[in-house]
Image (cartoon, rainbow, N blue to C red):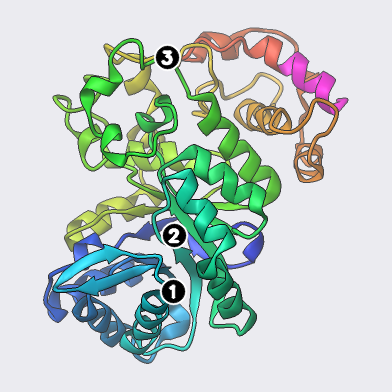
Amino acid sequence: MKYRTLGNTGIQVSEIAMGSEGLEGQSYEVCRALIETCLEQGINFFDLYNPNPETRRNFGKAMAGRRQAYVLQGHLCTVWQNGQYLRTRDIDSVRQSFESLLNDLGTDYIDVGMIHYADKKEDFETILSGPVLAYAKDLKARGVIKSIGLSTHSAEVAFMAVESGAIEVIMFSLNPAYDMRPGADIIEDLYELKNYEDNALSGMDEQRERLYQTCAAKGIAITVMKPYGGGMLLDAKKSPFEVALTPLQCLHYALTRPAVSAVMAGCFTPEQIREAARYETCSDEEKDFSVTLSSAPRHSYSGRCMYCGHCAPCTVGIDIALVNKYLDLAHSGSKDFIPETVREHYALLEHPASECISCGVCETNCPFGVAIIEKMAEAADVFGC
């Protein structure tokens, strides 16, 4: 298992992580089997949105005596009422539910205190100026949470979170289909095939792309939810591309986006966990999403670098995909300002873009028709070498 740093928090997390849908409504024995399988595979990062006390207690019982082996992304603003999960902004309910989370888990801290599910601008403004964020800040000041996060499906709200300076981790719905849709505040819209008609498949949504680049430049981590699109992308009949992707391809797509630290895979069986973790040892061909997408009956990724690596090997050794990623990150800021971290990472490259000899082999290999020679010249000009 590979581990990544969670943005500026310094927390080390497994890049393959586990969502908690598969724990809901299960017996302790089933929950323990799923959690044990995660640990066996090197997975240390778990999202816990669940307000269900039984689910929380099952997790806490399985975790007992080895808290340090877990990185927990626990949610604020989820409550359990009349046997149902609800989202709330009522601060008394928020406090009570979070304190119950700590008690149910048998821990005195949560690594990421995730403010739950804000998809509307007005909702986030209420959070930002109200008691919920103040409570999260107080928890962090007391060491009860180590960092503050926000979960959202809206790129607009995610940008507001970035600009607020208060949010360190964004849990965001990310996959190749959603990345072609403009930001929306209704999650159900992302599941509707009618919203992916030809006029909607217009290529990578600029707002979402800029979000990833800005988060990377500012050190704000992205943890990914919905990597499989709720299963939509795994079924050719439901996929807007009219072709099925595999779980490994979906994971690879998410993990190659800027700022992504981990992907929360939705797993319901030990076998599904092992298949997700197999990402670390599978062949390049198995996780390669580019061939499937570029040959799909319907897609609009032509001319855009997807960081898939098909351009390699470069004749002179340039890591072309990485140069293109740094170039995109450089463009995320103002025209005259490149984030220092981007400059530093570019400077560490063994072969800068200026070494390009314009042989064109990379362009022949690129499945998306990217003008790579032009990109290398642009990068050499932007970075000065």
Give the amino acid type for the residue marked by disc 3 in the picture. Answer: Ser
Query: In the image, which disc is placed on residue 91?
Result: 1
Above or below, comparing residue 336 to residue 229 in the picture: above
Determine whether, in the image, residue 141 is placed left or right of residue 182.
Answer: right
Front of the two marks 1 and 3? 1
Q: Which residue is mark 3?
A: 202
Determine whether, in the image, residue 328 is placed left or right of residue 57.
Answer: right
How many numbered circles does the render carry? 3
In depth, the one of 248 and 213 nearer the eye is 213
Viewer can see residue 4: no
Element assignment for label 1:
helix
Give the amino acid type for the residue marked by disc 1 in the picture. Answer: Ile
Instruction: Report the Cα–Cα distance between label 1 and label 3.
Output: 41 Å
In the image, what residue occupies the spot 34% across and 43% down?
227
Instruction: Report the Cα–Cα distance between label 2 and label 3.
Output: 35 Å
In the image, what residue occupies the spot 78% across and 42% down?
348
Query: In the image, which disc is placed on residue 1?
Result: 2
Instruction: Quadrant for the N terminus, please.
Output: bottom left
Above or below, comparing residue 247 to residue 84 in the picture: above
Front of the two marks 2 and 3? 3
